[in-house]
Amino acid sequence: MQKDLLASFLHLFHCFGNKRAAFVALLDYFNVDPGNADPGRVVEAGLSQLTASGLKPDLIRAIRQAQHPQVSRDLAWARQPGNHLVCFLDPAYPALLRQIDDFPVLLYARGNIDLLHNPQIAIVGSRLCTPGGAQTAIDFSSQLAGCGLTITSGMALGIDTQAHLGALRVDAATIAVNGTGLDRIYPPRNASLARDIMEKGLLVSEFPLGTQANRHSFPQRNRIISGLSLATLVVEAAARSGSLITARLAAEQGREVFAIPGSIHNPQTRGCHRLIRDGAKLVEQVGDITEELGSLLGFMLEQVGESKPGPSTNLDREHRNLLETIAYDPVNLDALVQRSGLTIDKLSSMLLVLELNNLIQSAPGGCFVRI
């Protein structure tokens, strides 16, 4: 978005504060949308036009006053290398996130902004995770990242931290959705992790610069974690874990929910067992996820009017060899296991990579076909 249009958007954004629905309604009233992204027409509107829109007098006064003081601060921040401001009118705004009912109207981002358009999976769980849960999060994160998925989480202590570390350890991308302004790191213990994510991934927040941690912001940001992602995986969660909020939001957004079971004696897995009872898919290995996501990816991208990524020229020999075993007629997993000599888990991961690169597609009956 052009600088002057972005300044107009930011002025309105800060005038409305947390009155997001009223802000979106006002833009709709003035026919400001992604195809006609000119918020300046609202800022320049006359008193009679703003009154006719149904705005209250205090908001009208705020809009008609000089530019909100936060705007210059935001624009100065966005001029720094690696910093970005992405409003929902901008083509750079992630299409999947735009599909949720209460999408954030503005994203502050630090790092590789292109990652917003990558296929993502959210990995979340307890802050007070067990050593076994921490290792499980790292293992699943690194393997799913190796399949071409971007790992998205909330940078909280516990499972979130391990999920980010799992991706970073295999030199893969990861996205952290913050519950504070991006000029503040929370929790402070994760300052080093935040720096690593900025270098290799992306930090994202809907909260203005200067926003401190509070008990309402973290549940609020959870809808962004799930909204950016094709699916959410819960590794460990107590009966009243905040991760269950993310899982509930994912289900409400029409996304898949996966949960890893654990010991009935471990209080940190009771939330996962509850999710499974309520319909989440039980996960024992990465293949349980990749097999499901192969077809889900195509469906979700069709929903937002996108096509799958084009073929990759960077496949390794192992993936190229597997591709040669897949014909243009449907073939099932059992046949592919026999042809390739790979385990189901390894095969499922590699099939997802081929599908993400638009080289194969899912077919009825659990089969795959070459494109």
Image (cartoon, rainbow, N blue to C red):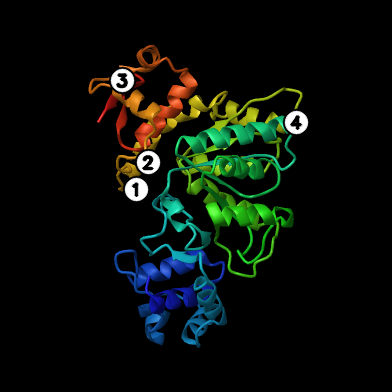
For badge 3, the amino acid type reads Thr
Nearest to viewer (mark 3 / mark 1): 3
**Residue situated furthest left in the rendering:** 328
In the rendered structure, which disc, 4 or 3, sits on the residue that comes first in sequence?
Answer: 4
Instruction: Label 2: state its secondary structure.
Output: helix
Whether residues under marks 1 and 4 lie with C-beta atoms below 8 angstroms apart, the answer is: no
Please tell me which residue is depicted at 64% across the width and 27% down the height of the picture: 273
Instruction: Determine which residue is flagged by label 4.
Output: 267
In the rendered structure, which disc, 3 or 1, sits on the residue that comes first in sequence?
Answer: 1
Q: Which mark is residue 325?
A: 3
Gap in angstroms between the C-alphas marked 4 and 2: 34 Å
237 or 132: which is nearer to us? 132
191 or 68: which is nearer to us? 191
Image quadrant holding the N terminus, namely bottom left
In the rendered structure, which disc, 1 or 4, sits on the residue that comes first in sequence?
Answer: 4
Gap in angstroms between the C-alphas marked 1 and 4: 39 Å
Instruction: Determine which residue is flagged by label 1.
Output: 304
Q: Residues within 10 Å of mark 4 (few under 14, many from 20)?
A: few
Gap in angstroms between the C-alphas marked 3 and 1: 32 Å
User: Residue 175 appears at what percent x and percent y?
Assistant: 54, 50
The answer to whether residue 52 of the structure is visible from this angle is: no
Q: In the rendered image, which quarter is residue 367 located in? A: top left
For badge 1, the amino acid type reads Val
Please tell me which residue is depicted at 49% across the width and 22% down the height of the picture: 345
Gap in angstroms between the C-alphas marked 1 and 2: 7 Å
User: Residue 337 appears at what percent x and percent y?
Assistant: 40, 15
Instruction: Label 3: state its secondary structure.
Output: loop
In the rendered structure, which disc, 4 or 2, sits on the residue that comes first in sequence?
Answer: 4
